[in-house]
Amino acid sequence: MPELPEVEVVRAGLAPAVTGARIEGVEVLDERSISRHEGDAAAFEAALLGRRLGVPARRGKFLWIPLEPEHGRQTTDALLAPGAHRALMAHLGMSGQVLVREPGAAADRHTRIRILIDQPQHGSLEIRFADQRLFGGLAVRPLVVGEGGGAVPDQAAHIALDPLEPAFDASAVARRLRLRRQGVKAALLDQQLVSGIGNIYADEALWRSRLHYATPGQRLTQARALALLADVRDVLERALAEGGTSFDAQYVNVNGQAGYFEHSLNAYGRGGQPCRRCGAIMVREAWMNRGSTRCPRCQRRPRGLA
DNA sequence: GCGCGCACCTGAATGC
DNA sequence: TGCATTCAGGTGCGCG
């Protein structure tokens, strides 16, 4: 599942291939993959055709490529003031992939959108958005001022800074976390508190911090909350260094290659296996319509919780 | 405002 | 062998 490290690997892979490129063709094969776009496939294609792409950017699990300003072109987008900037926004959802291929390369399974570009250094390339479960998608969205002051697509304006952004204020996030009555795992997955964390890295960070997922944020000291956020950052950085996690082959980089962090996972997907710290058998429990894996010895349920 | 449950969606795995 | 069911989970929305 693509979380922050996987999306960052995709962003970094896209940067040399798309920066400065001109869009020569757009083909929407499945309109469900542009459900976040306001308009039909024809409108999506018209919004991109002939535009030049800027440097890909990311916040949490949202990825976008700014479209360079249109000089002398009249916009028909009611959301957009004349001269304002827009971006091609991507969210990978559960199974989205952004692939860079040579034109005419063999078909990729579940390809939903094809974008043909001409890049000054690399010539003609095809960007493919493939998505099995259709939770992800592409959209052309106006850029607005997001948290921290930078430009983000309007649909990501509510998304908090992620732990790898220079402006991320761990002390402030820890204070907000400690106001929550909800369990720490639910808080970590709240993209309006801290972005980029999904089920895999939440389980990994909680294992490192020896915290049960249901521990209320209110029960954490500031030091414990800061230590948890440090563990979150550490696990994200390590996963990024290993090219991300390709647990069920739903994530690959822009060249279609899997990451290696699956081999370094200590919690997610290890139910029934011994804890790498204490040897107790890890348990996988139903939690919030998902699964959550923990060590019953290292990550005990807090006293007083059902 | 917060916390929780649910719909969306497909294909692999499992059960009968 | 074939059909039905279960499971995976990020996001947005509705309800209490």
Image (tube, coloured by chain):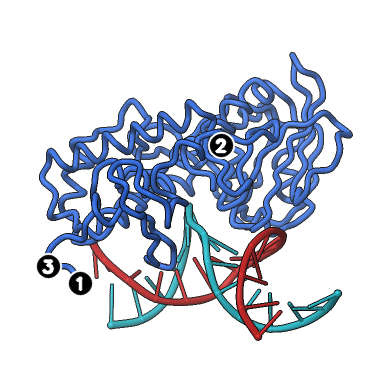
Chain colours: A blue, B red, C cyan
A75 or A29: nearer the eye?
A29
A113 or A276: nearer the eye?
A276
Residue drawn at (16%, 54%), measured in percent from left and top?
A179
Q: Which residue is mark 2?
A: A64
Residue A306's disc is: 1
Q: Which residue is mark 3?
A: A304
Q: Which of the two discs, 2 and 3, labels the residue nearer the N terminus?
A: 2
Q: Position of residue A205 (x, y in %)?
A: 32, 43
Residue drawn at (34%, 47%), measured in percent from left and top?
A275
Foreground label between 2 and 1 = 1
Which element is circle 1 on?
loop
* CA neighbours of label 1 inside 10 A, class few (<14), some (14 to 19), many (20+): few
Q: Which of the two discs, 2 and 1, labels the residue nearer the N terminus?
A: 2
Depicted A118 relative to depicted A173: above or below: above
Residue drawn at (61%, 39%), measured in percent from left and top?
A88
A293 or A256: nearer the eye?
A293
Q: Position of residue A194 (x, y in %)?
A: 33, 44
* CA neighbours of label 2 inside 10 A, class few (<14), some (14 to 19), many (20+): many
* Amino acid type at image mark 1: Ala
Disc 2 chain ID: A
